[in-house]
RNA sequence: CGGAGUGUAGCGCAGUCUGGUAGCGCACCUGGUUUGGGACCAGGGGGUCGAAGGUUCGAGUCCUUUCACUCCGACCA
């Protein structure tokens, strides 16, 4: 391809809304273009080429692992979403609309329902299983706050795969295979990443893992162990239970007058007791389907912090929202003096695992200016769950190593779904005994368009993009320094032809611009190798540049073809 | 949805306080010079000033309403 023929609107200006390197360089390099609506982008020729290269890697590895590509209709009838129960549950992110006959439709944000529908219409027998079907297609999510360009757009390209099995064991086998396949994909794309334990969120199911590209600008906080392979999203991370060196308070059970001590800090100071021995009681309103809601008290050690996603999962709610002091008062709870041991009608209590069989505790008496001392939970029958947020510096549950926070970009997520969709949607098969049972499912996603952004977040310098080999829009850039010099043109043209003949994707910069402008564009576009044909040609020398590190090397002009063959075709 | 801000040429912005011919830089078009780090000279094209209503002889500017976008937060496969 020739630069003079290609639509590559590069720009010196940094677009106003762009703050991340990936967003800035993708727009400045003419890879993508904002549509004006928030979170909507056009892919220009260069961006489309990168997208295709990434999709090709994804497709090759999946096909190698035995998956089959399909393409599902983007517009989905709402009835399928009603069958699965997600029409209600998914919320405003789901774009709903009617056709001319007033029938309801949604734009697919993910396609479990559609794929289950496809399979239930065509698969009857255990002999036809397992199956792993995927597509690489547009998705639409009406994000509350789209940002960071391709990182969190409303419309985006995702690979979504779904597997169907006769047993949980077989699904687990496929899940592990997908984890290995994803590792191959992200490694081929040249990314540094980490596989972490994750929360399953709205999709449902259990045992999910996220693939996080490590980058300072990542939107997700992940907890990683410095000593072993353990990694988890902050929403799912666990650590060794917290401990304390300080002495437990010695007290028999009693109600104690504690004026003006509404916070853990104040209480800790009042009794001169480590917050470890205090019970923090957090009230939330848990929201359920059909507008149902209830108040829940979450009790954990004063030294711990509530992790809301865990709390939400513990009570199986759709969402948790804060409760005002007035609301609490209305149902008989005293803000600042709440405790899990005195509860009013209709309020449930969930204890953190860290409080199981704990003793010598202090908690609110649910009465203004009073706390209980000498509380013991030994042998107490109650709901216990993991509620606490893992803090930096805590000890790894696997190896005892130090845990630290880091930021990651979620580029892949795999779930063990089970029968969450196959059961309500009636995706059944006949087993060896002729019995009808629901298929066991797994689901596997990769954010294909997000990967463009993730690659640049990890691979860029102050001059622009540095594409990895597998993602680059072209392999080689031939830069003609002066298009008025016929010798330069002649060599460039013959090199261009020779490279194309051996299957190298080449971009020839034959524009009339000055050297500096073209060089800056080359650096901005980030193509792995360039040959600069310039004034040293009169001495029989051209310059070869490796974009990564901008390493330059002079090469004899009559040896350049062989030189490039070695460089480009060896790996 | 809460807080803050911005809407003027393709992009980045000035002009708004104090009403009086629509501006600048980049980009673009024509001609010429230039060619190793974003050149120069000369000429040129391009605007419902986010939208609606109001005040006024006159509104980009003042008043009212509204829409969109950006940032922080809440939220989020």
Image (cartoon, coloured by chain):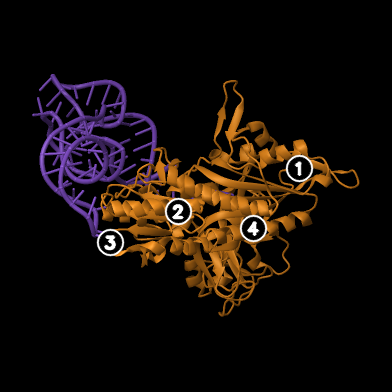
Kindly identify the residue that appears in the image at 55 percent across and 41 percent down.
A139
Is residue A337 visible in the rendered structure shown here? no
Give whichever of discs 3 and 1 has the lower sequence position.
1
Residue A351 found in image quarter: bottom right
On the same chain, marks 3 and 1? The answer is yes
The reply to whether discs 3 and 1 touch (Cβ–Cβ < 8 Å) is: no
> Rounded to the nearest whole Å, what is the CA distance between mark 3 and mark 1?
74 Å
Chain under callout 3? A
B27 relative to A457 in the view: left or right? left
Q: Residue furthest right?
A: A433
> Rounded to the nearest whole Å, what is the CA distance between mark 2 and mark 3?
21 Å
Depicted A251 relative to depicted A545: above or below: below
Identify which residue, A401 or A55, lies in the foreground. Answer: A55
Q: Which residue is mark 4?
A: A181
Q: Which residue is mark 3?
A: A538
Depicted A59 relative to depicted B59: above or below: below
Name chain B's colour: purple
> Rounded to the nearest whole Å, what is the CA distance between mark 2 and mark 4?
36 Å
On the same chain, marks 2 and 4? The answer is yes
Q: Position of residue A344 (x, y in %)?
A: 64, 52
Chain drawn in orange? A
Tag 3: Cα neighbours inside 10 Å, few (<14), some, or many (≥20)? Answer: few
Chain under callout 2? A
Q: Which residue is mark 1?
A: A423
Give whichever of discs 4 and 3 has the lower sequence position.
4
> Rounded to the nearest whole Å, what is the CA distance between mark 1 and mark 4?
28 Å
Residue A34 found in image quarter: top left
Q: Which residue is mark 2?
A: A498
Chain under callout 1? A
């Amino acid at each position: 391809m020739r630069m003079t023929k290609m639509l590559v609107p590069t720009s010196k200006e940094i677009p106003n809304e762009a703050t991340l390197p990936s967003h800035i360089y993708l727009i400045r390099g003419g890879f993508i273009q904002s549509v004006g609506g928030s979170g909507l982008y056009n892919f220009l020729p260069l961006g489309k080429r990168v997208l295709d290269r990434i999709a090709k890697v994804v497709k090759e590895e999946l096909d190698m692992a035995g998956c089959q590509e399909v393409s599902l209709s983007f517009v989905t009838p709402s009835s399928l979403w009603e069958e699965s129960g997600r029409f209600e549950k998914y919320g405003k992110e789901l774009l709903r609309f009617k056709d001319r006959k007033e029938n309801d439709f949604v734009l697919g944000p993910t396609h479990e329902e559609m794929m289950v529908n496809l399979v239930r219409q065509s698969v009857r027998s255990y002999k036809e299983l397992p199956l792993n079907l995927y597509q690489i297609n547009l998705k639409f999510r009406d994000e509350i706050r789209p940002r960071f360009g391709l990182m969190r757009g409303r419309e985006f390209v995702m690979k979504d795969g779904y597997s169907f099995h006769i047993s949980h064991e077989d699904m687990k086998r496929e899940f592990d295979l997908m984890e290995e396949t994803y590792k191959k994909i992200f490694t081929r794309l040249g990314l540094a990443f980490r596989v972490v334990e994750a929360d399953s969120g709205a999709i449902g199911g259990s045992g999910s893992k996220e693939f996080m590209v490590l980058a300072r600008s990542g939107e997700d906080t992940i907890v990683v162990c410095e000593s072993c392979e353990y990694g988890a999203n902050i929403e799912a991370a666990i650590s060794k239970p917290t401990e304390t060196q300080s002495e437990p308070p010695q007290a028999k059970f009693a109600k104690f007058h504690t004026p003006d001590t509404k916070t853990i800090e104040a209480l800790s100071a009042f009794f001169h007791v480590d917050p470890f021995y205090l019970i923090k009681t957090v009230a939330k309103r848990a929201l359920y389907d059909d507008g149902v809601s209830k108040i829940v008290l979450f009790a954990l050690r004063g030294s711990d912090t509530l992790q809301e996603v865990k709390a939400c999962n513990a009570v199986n709610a759709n969402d948790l929202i804060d409760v005002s002091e007035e609301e609490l008062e209305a149902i008989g709870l005293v803000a600042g003096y709440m405790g899990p041991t005195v509860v009013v009608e209709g309020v449930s209590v969930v204890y953190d695992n860290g409080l199981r069989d704990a003793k010598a505790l202090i908690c609110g008496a649910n009465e203004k200016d009073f706390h209980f001392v000498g509380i013991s939970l030994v042998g107490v029958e109650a709901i216990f769950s993991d509620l606490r947020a893992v803090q930096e510096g805590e000890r790894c549950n696997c190896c005892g190593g130090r845990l630290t926070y880091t930021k990651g970009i979620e580029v892949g997520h795999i779930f063990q779904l089970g029968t969450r969709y196959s059961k309500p949607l009636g995706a059944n098969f006949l087993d060896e005994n002729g019995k009808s049972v629901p298929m066991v499912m797994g689901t596997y996603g990769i954010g294909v368009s997000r990967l463009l952004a993730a690659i640049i977040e990890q691979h860029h310098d102050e001059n622009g993009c540095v594409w990895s080999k597998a993602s680059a829009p072209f392999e080689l850039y031939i830069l003609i320094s002066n298009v008025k010099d016929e010798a330069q043109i002649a060599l460039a043209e013959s090199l261009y032809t020779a490279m194309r003949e051996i299957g190298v994707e080449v971009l020839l910069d034959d524009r009339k611009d000055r050297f500096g402008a073209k060089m800056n564009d080359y650096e901005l576009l980030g193509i792995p190798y360039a040959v600069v044909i310039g004034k040293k040609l009169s001495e029989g020398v051209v310059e070869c540049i490796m974009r990564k590190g901008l390493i330059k090397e002079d090469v004899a002009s009559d040896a350049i073809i062989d030189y490039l063959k070695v460089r480009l075709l060896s790996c």
